[in-house]
Image (cartoon, rainbow, N blue to C red):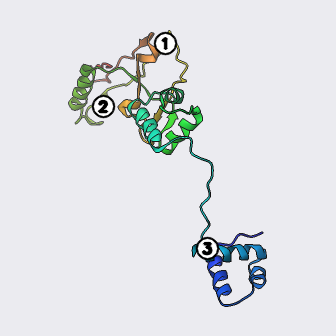
Amino acid sequence: MARLSREDRQIALGRLQAGQSQSAIARHFHVSQGTISRLWVRFQATGSVADLPRAGRPRATTAAQDRFIRLRHLRNRFLSASSSVQALPGPHRLSDQTVQYRLHKAGLRARRPHRGAVLTRRHRQNRVQWGNQHLRWTVRNHWRHVWFSDESYFLLQRHDGRRRVYRRVNERYAPNCVDEAPIHGGGGVMVWGRSIPLEGAPWCTSKGA
């Protein structure tokens, strides 16, 4: 049986008020007479043809608990949903899925974090200094004389990569969303390629920070 739209309900109500029979209106809209009858009763009781509010399933969390979950994961993006279940105040124990759903509603989804090297203040200063020194280098006069070689890493330890971070869209490289760790899980041999100048160009070496 078709369901009446809001416009059809208004038209049906107008026909009822004009004196047309419920059965004739029901045939016109291809619905049962009971549908038109309930529409008329609802209008007489509430003065509106809109659907009455439904109770639905009660929420498992309060607004304060939703705010607690959101702020907790914003302060520490690497917390798991199960840890928030344990820390959440209240008499009722929630499921991990409920916490994840609340985080999804707040725009936070579990992603694999970007793994970045541990950079000290000196490392960052050196990188900025190097970038400023080579800011005005051009391909024609400078970079064409430098040959770049990718470094090779040989791991001694492996990382399972199962850690997750709750972050918003476009927050992959946000400082509080980057999983800082020693290069390649801490422990390994790194072999650097040496830059080789072309004929007639001065030697140029580079360092990795």
Q: Splitting the image into 4 quarters, where does residue 116 fall?
A: top left
In the rendered image, residue 19, in percent from the top left (x then y), is placed at: 69, 90
Residue appearing at x 53%, y 36% in the figure: 99
Mark 1 vs mark 2: give the one in front.
1
Query: Is residue 54 visible to the viewer in this orientation of the structure?
Result: yes
- Circle 2 residues within 10 Å: few <14, some 14–19, many ≥20: some
In the rendered image, residue 41, in percent from the top left (x then y), is placed at: 67, 75
In the rendered image, residue 115, in percent from the top left (x then y), is placed at: 44, 25
In the rendered image, residue 171, in percent from the top left (x then y), is placed at: 41, 38
Q: Disc number at residue 143?
A: 2
Residue appearing at x 50%, y 33% in the figure: 90
Q: Splitting the image into 4 quarters, where does residue 70 fall?
A: top left
Mark 2 vs mark 3: give the one in front.
3
What residue does disc 3 label?
45
Mark 1 belongs to which amino acid?
Answer: Phe
Mark 3 vs mark 1: give the one in front.
3
